[in-house]
Image (tube, rainbow, N blue to C red):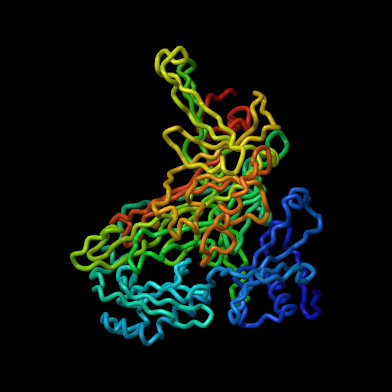
Amino acid sequence: MKTKDVTVETVREVAHPLDPLTATELRTAIETLRSARGLDERHRFAIVRLAEPEKQAVTSFRPGDPIERTAFAIVFDRETGTTHETLVDVVAGEVRSWKDVPGVQPSVTLDEFGEAIAAVRAHAGFREALTKRGIEDPELVHIEAWSIGDMAPAGLEGRRLVWTPCWVKSDPADNHYAHPIRGLHAVVDLQTMEIVQLEDHGVTPLPPQAGNYAEADVGGYRDDLRPLEVLQPEGPSFDVDGWEVRWQRWRLRVGFNQREGLTLHDVGYEDGGRVRSIANSLSIAELVIPYGDPGPGGYRKNAFDIGEYGLGLLTNSLELGCDCLGEIRYLDVDLATPGGEITTIKNAICLHEEDDGLLWKHYDWTTDTTEVRRSRRFVVSSIVTVDNYEYAFYWRFYQDGAIEFETRLTGIILTAALEPKEAPRHGTLIAPQLSGIYHQHFFCARLDLDVDGVENTVVEVESESLPWGPENPHGSAFVTRETPLTSEHEAQRVVDPLRARSWKVVNPGVRNELGQPVGYRLVAGANVLPFAQPDSSISRRAAFMTKHLWVTPHEPGERYPAGDYPNQHAGGAGLPEWTAADRPVENRDVVLWYVFGNNHVPRPEDWPVMPAARIGFRLEPVGFFDRNPSLDVAPPASHACHADSS
Ligand SMILES: [Cu+2]
């Protein structure tokens, strides 16, 4: 399938097989496809990303080795509704494979959003419904296009559809979420851009108050904060080489793709002169937000932000001093747009260090000496905006060997209009006649851990009291129970904080000085289960959220917990499908899928813009080291922080 008329630019800047596709490579992929497959303006690039090489090829890679570079693309033909998956060798400029994928819908693309919204705005029936509500200027109406899930109106099944809730601004700068237009929804066919259904469930008055938060709206800013400056006069303590980062004893590679956004790879820790592997890759592989309102404006609000939309093109360009503070290094990312243009998001990924308070301390009163160490952490972060909401993703590395993931949820909650005396049943009253709708955010982290190699076993660890008896004569005895999770079904677990439940990934073949298998444990943070019924549409489509832990044997094709194509999918794909065979997961290359839910019952304080909520988890060494690995962190310069032995 070699094509003649494509100029293949030299790929100079690629240093490693996992480097995200560069602008040049993306352009080569798109030009090769256009030329070899005759793609034109009816074709849309739902995604173009690096086809990651096999794990073996990555682990055996040494700097200077030749690098194979292949792009994976999903191409959608808007005329025929056909979806194609293709692989393009971007070094040779050749299409390696091209196939039709029947019966799926790729993610909704940004240009489809724009066109669907414009079509609704221009629609005569929609304008009539606005007039009926006293809304004269359709340009002030904010329309959002949401995937319809598997709830297409009768007779429209199988078509590529979105549905649209809407809000209205009092002027172009107004926060439209203060003024939801209740009961007016369109269903749009994304191939023809026709309004296939217009729903008008009756007129509810617009909530009366504005929800703006500029300086003038909040009565001026407080003026009692004095400067707090982060100074690193000798620069930061990390080194960045392309996509590779070294900080303290940590070694890792940063990655990025159009679907998941920020990813991490090849995470290791230098110990005794060699780098010990901890994770092959870490990413947030899906994020789904089911809403709890059964009304006409709520029952279809089930967004898969990663699988239905993709975080890559929604990633913010970060501002120094605003999003991150201190000595920052940024990474830019290159992405393809649905129309095949190349776009660069400047400062998409932030790398920096933060003071983290106390690392460890002891005052020995027998010698009247104190030893104190301060903790510093290294942070890799990015922020996405998905319509009303912001998600900030922070991967943090610590000097004691811990890795932490935290996401901060901020932005604006979704609102619904209430009748003047109506009490919300599925939301909180956040302003007069305005409801903040109940919803949940379920994140699924894909954790391909390789603790000192690939042969790992996951063990559930929990503590329990013993019954009174000879083993427990004082009633205070408790023990810790360890249960290996040997098969996929055994390894479908939920959190139990009252039993201090955690999951430890051990390498039975590698022992520490004490003879224990080396390990890392997954420590859950806050969590919840879905409140949707188990056989509801969203529970079928996002079945991964019904468990907090899943473990699967590593399979390169198993990347997304709700399947490759969750958009309009009826459910069953991804984790439930893969784990149906109940494959063994003991002493082999395993992938952990940790699901964590944020139950969002909005507060009045979440309005009009929400203080960041936080949720995440930690990975902590357990027997990975022989003792506290941070003993050699130097004390702070102050003499009082440690006993001076000189
Ligand atoms: Cu929320």
> Which residue is pictured at 42% across the width and 72% down the height?
144
Give the left or right position of residue 637, taking residue 472 as reference: right
Compared to 641, does 90 lie above or below?
A: below
Considering every residue shown, the one lying at the far front of the view is: 155
Q: Is any atom of residue 379 visible in this view?
A: yes
Residue 638 x/y as whole percent: 50, 33
Compared to 87, does 284 lie above or below?
A: above
Give the left or right position of residue 181, taking residue 517 as reference: left
**Quadrant where the C terminus lies?**
top right
Residue 51 x/y as whole percent: 69, 61
**Quadrant where the N terminus lies?**
bottom right
Q: How many marks?
A: 0
> Which residue is pictured at 61% across the width and 82% down the height?
42
Residue 349 position by quadrant: bottom right
Residue 80 position by quadrant: bottom right
Considering every residue shown, the one lying at the far bottom of the view is: 124
> Which residue is pictured at 35% across the width and 61% down the height?
609
Give the left or right position of residue 407, taking residue 422 as reference: right
Which image quadrant shows ligand 1? Answer: bottom left
Residue 394 x/y as whole percent: 52, 51
Residue 335 x/y as whole percent: 61, 68
Give whichever of 78, 602 is nearer the camera. 78
Q: Is any atom of residue 228 visible in this view?
A: no
Give the left or right position of residue 99, taking residue 596 as reference: right
Give whichever of 154, 55 is nearer the camera. 154
